[in-house]
Amino acid sequence: MPSNVSLKEELDLRLHEKTCDELHVLNLQQVVDSPTHSFQIINDLQMHYKEVFAKDRTDLSLILTLGKANQLGPPALDALKKGLQDHLRMLKQTETNTKQPNAVLEHDAAKRRADKLAEILRSKLIWDNTHDELQILDASDISIRYQKLVSLQQSCDILKMYSLDKSQLETFEKIREEFLAWYSPATILALDSNDIKQLENIREKYSSLDRIQVFESNLGGYPKSKLKSFFESKKDELSLWNILDEIFTIWKRCHKTIDSFIAENGSEFVCKNLKEAIESNWQTILSVITTIISNAESPFIAAKSIGKILYDYTAMIEEEGDSFILFLFSELAKSIYFIISEDYGKHVTSILLCTINKIMPDKSSRHQHNWLMPYLEDIQSCMYDIVNEARSTFGTNFSRHIIPSFELAIREINSFLQNQDILNIQTNSVDIRKRKSVQENTEDKLSAICSAGYLLNMVKDVNDYIIQVTSESLGSTENLMLITKYSILETLTVKVVERKIESIANTIIYPMEDEMQKMWQKHAEELVDGSSNSKDDLSTSLPSFSVSPQNYVTGIGHGLLSQMNTISAYGNDRNFITAISCAASNGKKSFNG
């Protein structure tokens, strides 16, 4: 070191070097010769650096800097920006030059490694000694065996991360499982007697032996075990009601106790295990349902009986249970409804088809069509009754059990009306009764149009009734099933309207054609007989009408007026309006298409 440079200056220069070596500085000759003086200098430098750092931090504080910056112009702001950049460079250089006390870190690391090594060695000694002791310990010494197993478990938790003899580990796990095997039935008994203290003692053993998940599994085994025992003991006395009652009783008995021993919700935990128990014993439940159905007079009666039991018990659960057990019973009810719905649906279909097959017109009134309406009203009334029965049987989700039968009935109605040509829409059929008046013929055609419109309104009314019944009990119509497959009725209505409009026009056209035919036939006969030989006679003679021309024209006018009056009378008929609107809408689609 140059003699003209003081120790303080030398230290200051060295500490600002990027590659400063603290050990080299401390080994300088001047420092070694004057340790007290050197310490004082280093202490002064440290205080100086702290003051400089504090000043720089204050100058660079956000609030102060922004407050001063607002008072400066652009040149001053540029200078401030440059100053900030210089400060940042200086801070980064200082951070780079700063080194950690390597000796201290190495000491700490060495101490940690020594402690870990001692822990491993201690665990190894405990593992070997305790493992040998367990081999010779009597199985009846439960308390001592438990203490030894806890020691082994603690050692195992440490050693398994490093090195552990595989055979010894397998032996330990076997001994541990054998020890805990006794506590599995003990857990069931403690739950059954609601012995909280015993359950806490058992949980402590499972927890200290790293088998808490097995303890929770044993808790879940309680509802399974109880339900299985119930089915076995009551094999010849099972009924739907006592099955539901046993499930609910098991839940009430244990869900609160279990809730205090597991992390998740106790009720949800019990319900999940009850669901598994129900699934494993489903064949037994199925046989009970099948017996009820086979012993009933009809599927309707069986379904109503089962539905009432499910409805009453669900109402009780809504009052005494919670959302988890209610959901479990709702899912169970759905599964039971699915069993009875097939036979129930067949019975509903049979009732509807029997009602449809009653449609049988009198031969004398076949062309009048107004005979059909009472039969259609009976079908609609039957559907209303089925809706009410299904609601009382299946609850709020009743519609899905009857809609397929309703849609099948609609297809059967359409097939019956078209195959039998009940509404006279086939082009080769006679749709005009010549012995009847224009008004009578017109009324017949309009009644056929109203019958077609009634079918469309029937679908709408039944759907509205389903919505009404559902909303009254549920307050919501989400996931509701309605009749949607009835486009065949719309097609039928279009055919009926087109055919009947044509027939209404023909009630005027046909008589006119008949009179014209008679006129030309008479004239032709006169020509053949030679009775009209004079050109003047041909030019002056008039054709022969069955009625006088004046009366004929007057009759045609009266017929047209009669038609208009008859059609006007149907102007407010809901079924007539529906049919005409349907035909007009479909006709527009066909035209645009």
Image (cartoon, grey):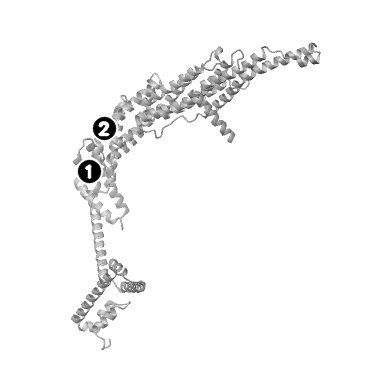
Q: Indicate the amino acid at tag 1.
A: Ile
Q: Is residue 41 visible?
A: yes
Seen as rendered, the residue at the extreme bottom is 3
On the image, numbered disc 2 is attached to which residue? 320
At label 1, counting other C-alpha atoms closer than 10 Å, the crowd grade (few under 14, some 14-19, many 20 or more) is some
Residue 133: x percent and y percent?
Answer: 22, 51
Residue 229 appears in the figure: no
404 over 86 or under it: above or below:
above
Instruction: Say what amino acid the circle numbered 2 marks.
Output: Glu
Question: Mark 2 falls on what kind of element?
Answer: helix
**Residue nearest the observer in this picture, 344 or 67:** 67
Question: Looking at the figure, which quarter contains the C terminus?
Answer: top right
Residue under the image location 25 percent in, 71 percent down:
54
Residue 100 versus residue 461 in the image, above or below: below
Image spot of residue 216 (x, y percent): 28, 43
Between 527 and 150, the one lying in front of the other is 527
- The quarter of the rendered structure image containing the N terminus is bottom left
The residue that label 1 is drawn on is 202
Pinpoint residue 226: horizontal percent, then vertical percent: 28, 33
